[in-house]
Amino acid sequence: MEFEILPFEMKDYDEVYQLWQSCEGIGLSEADSPERIQSYLARNPGCSFVARKNGQIVGAVLGGSDGRRGYLHHLAVHPSVRRLGIGSRLTQMALQALGRQGIDRVHIFVYADNRVGIAFWERMGWRLRSNLVLMSIDLPQTF
């Protein structure tokens, strides 16, 4: 099976969003609106990718950094083409792009009950950090 990995561009947004919606373990919010994704891609050029097979997007990943640590978000591969190396290749491309920026550690966020996702990341060599706890706060719309 042949697929190609390309930079994520805004023209891909609608198709990628549909992919995210079709995959379990992807939590979508207002942060995934076209405007916010466009801003994310502009702040992190060359770090996010899509996978195409026969012209259709079958995988995607968002990669970026805060200048100190890297982050991967929303890695998704369509269920019909899983276990063919697409997720691994998307991850590799994003990590290489972050590495070229001087990033030496990358984090991901995985839902605790996403056993399939956790197993994928462990097979890829990632480790669970039980010494960290994720905490969040929602900011008011007007500040």
Image: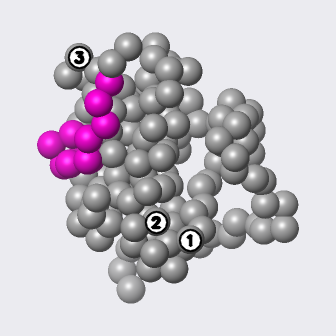
Count the labels in the image. 3
Residue 135: give x, y in percent of width and height: 68, 69
The magenta segment is 3-13
Q: CA distance from mark 3 to mark 1?
A: 35 Å
Q: CA distance from mark 1 to mark 2?
A: 6 Å
Residue in the image at 28% along x and 58% along y: 46
Mark 1 Cα within 10 Å, few/some/many (few <14, many 20+)? few
Q: Is residue 39 above or below residue 66?
A: above
Judged left or right of residue 140, residue 51 is: left
Q: Are marks 1 and 2 in contact (CB under 8 Å)?
A: yes
Q: Is residue 5 magenta?
A: yes
- Where, quadrant-wise, is the C terminus in this rendering? bottom left
Specify whether residue 12 is in view.
yes
Residue 28: give x, y in percent of width and height: 46, 45
Residue in the image at 19% along x and 49% along y: 10
Secondary element at image label 3: loop
